[in-house]
Amino acid sequence: MTQFRFVYPVIFLIFLCTVALAQEIQWHDPLAAGFAIHGQLHGVDGYARLPEEAEGQIRQPVWNLSRHTAGLELRFITDASTIQVRFVPTGNIQMPHMPATGVSGLDLYVKNDAGIQDWVRGAYSFGDTVSYIFRINLPEQEEREFKLYLPLYNGVKDLEVGVATGNQLKFIPTSPEKPIVVYGTSIAQGACASRPGMAWPAIVGRDMDHTVINLGFSGNGRLEPEVLAYMANTEATVYILDCLPNLVPSVNWTEEEIKNRLIHAVQFLNEKQPDAPVLMVEHAGYSDGLTDRERESAVEKVNSWAKDVYMKLFSEGVTEIYLLTKEAIQLDLDATVDGTHPSDWGMQQLAEGYVEILREILDE
């Protein structure tokens, strides 16, 4: 009986503390703030990558993947030393070859005095609700600018950002700057980064201080006219076409079909946005190419066809066209998790290849 008399007060005390702690947190809904989501095409609302009107206009797999939040960011200013984020995921938490932190996780960066983005470690919990607690332990508590990357392979509902009552939090509106727009495959979407900030488009965005729109669609980067049309509605500083890993030679993907898709994509973007350069990207290769000659041969073929298209278009007067080659990327043999999808190390190598040629294109 004595034990029960002791337990009840303790439980009640824990309950009171929980309520008190909950009351100390002020939760903020980014959507209620308006125009707070970065990394989206024009005309897209909510936590999505293609507009609602695209449903029924594009293939269902692409529509489903467009509900994933790869490349979407929240940017805000706060003086809080602890930042909490919670949301309801709409899909599976993890995959066999990709951890929950990459599939469904968040990633927070803070801008330091030199303007560099520093990573903030977070404590996380995955379940029906995904929760993160980020603590910023710096000598002075002052307003700082943060960038929060949303999940790579999951959708988001009811997201809220919480700071202690008394701390300020202001969401940063989207910028009028022209973004870099990427159309790609699972590799661009972020497979298999350990966390969202390690996907190569995110790394490129931080290194170049540019907004990058991620239109990577896992297994479905096929240079489709319907997706290209939505891309062209957003004026870009550069359009990147990195779809060859989903267009490797097969019965369905012949030399003629692949070349026609590449030609149409470049010509279409050049017609709709003539001032925007188009960067074609070769297949970066398979890390098991030395032990699987068939896969290596497929890469060699599709890359030779891409070179043919590049030379053809350039000779026909399409001057705002560039080619990032497999050799310029130079993925290491140990740069993937399964021979195809990059690890964090592979993502870093991809990003370095992109940054080098993008700086040349943009003269930075």
Image (cartoon, rainbow, N blue to C red):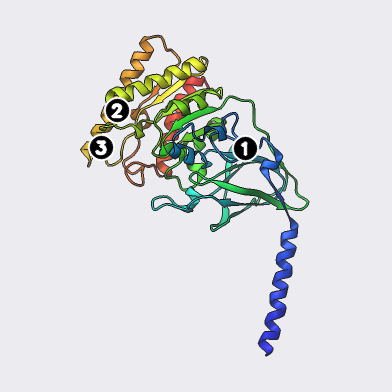
Camera-side residue: 360 or 68?
Answer: 68
Q: Report helix, strand or loop for mark 3.
A: helix
Residue at 50% from the left image edge and 37% from the top image edge: 203
Above or below, comparing residue 278 to residue 214 in the picture? above
10 Å neighbourhood of mark 3: few (<14), some, or many (≥20)?
A: some
Camera-side residue: 345 or 200?
Answer: 200
In the image, taking residue 15 as reference, residue 147 lies left or right, namely left
Q: Tell me which numbered mark, 1 or 2, is placed earlier along the sequence.
A: 1
- Residue 4 appears in the picture as rendered: yes
Kind of residue sitting beneath label 2 = Val
Q: What residue did someone put label 1 on? A: 37
Q: Tell me which numbered mark, 2 or 3, is placed earlier along the sequence.
A: 3
Residue at 69% from the left image edge and 89% from the top image edge: 2
How far is the residue under mark 1 from the one under mark 2? 36 Å
Residue 209: x percent and y percent? Answer: 57, 31
Q: What residue did someone put label 2 on? A: 302
Give the quarter of the figure containing the N terminus: bottom right
Q: Quadrant of residue 145?
A: top right
Q: What residue did someone put label 3 on? A: 295
Kind of residue sitting beneath label 3 = Arg
- Residue 144 appears in the picture as rendered: no
